[in-house]
Amino acid sequence: MSASTSASVPTREVARRAFAAEFNDATYTFKESDDDRAPVYSLLPTGERANRVFVVGTLTETEDVGDDSEYWRGRIVDPTGTFFAYAGQYQPEATSVLRETETPAYVAVVGKPRSYETDEGDINVSLRPESITVVDEATRNRWVVETADRTLDRIEAFETADEYAAMAETQYDPDLSIYRDQVIAALEDLEDDAEVAAEA
């Protein structure tokens, strides 16, 4: 591929890792340009922008909530909270996984954050999955450890960080100790699981 053609191909954004508790707090979205096709970013309270996210958790519940056509909602739980993923006719692969997977099952999801305002004026954040894959417990455990590391990195860099940390400070005025506590709780949850498995 020559340089001239590669410039017109949009590069896929890195999928960020975030625990459910932080993801659900990421209610502020923005674009970096006025171009209609410019990516929409969700601003994580720990100071990172996310156009795509990578999450792994337990798919505990699926439901077809569509009226005229299939529109599936999946409830995915990690040690800090719950992600809601919605897939319809434009995400056929993700839709079929939500339709066919027996719950509970560990799943890995790559998708885009979506926020919408409820009738009550609250902002809810959900995932529009690009892909959903059934995975094993080891994959889930590795995701928890790696996501804990990334979250702590963001917290530690926050004071000296870039424009996104400054933006998060302005938009959320976040109490970063909450996210640190969630990291610790998530890792302790893994240790408890490991102990239970060892005893079994």
Image: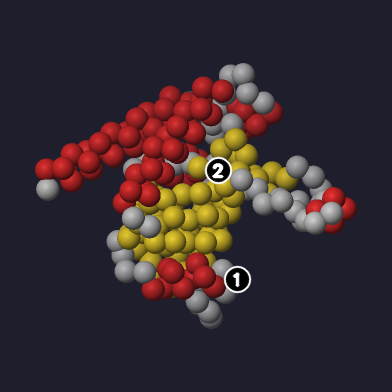
Residue 66 appears anywhere in the view: no
Q: Position of residue 40 (x, y in %)?
A: 68, 49
Q: Nearer the viewer, residue 194 or 187?
A: 194
Q: Is residue 101 left or right of residue 114?
A: left
Count the labels in the image. 2
Residue 198 falls in image quadrant: top left
Q: Nearer the viewer, residue 146 or 157?
A: 146
Q: Position of residue 175 (x, y in %)?
A: 48, 26
Residue 16: which numbered mark, if any? 2
Residue farthest top in this picture: 160
Mark 2 and mark 1 residues within 8 Å of each other at the beta carbon: no
- Cα separation between marks 2 and 1: 22 Å
Residue 33 appears anywhere in the view: yes
**Measured along the vertical axis of the image, is residue 144 above or below residue 67?**
above
Q: Position of residue 120 (x, y in %)?
A: 52, 52
Q: Nearer the viewer, residue 36 or 175?
A: 36
- The quarter of the picture where the N terminus appears is bottom right
In the picture of the structure, the residue carrying the numbered disc 1 is: 90
**How dense is the environment of label 2, judged by Cα within 10 Å: few (below 14), some, or many (20 and up)?**
some
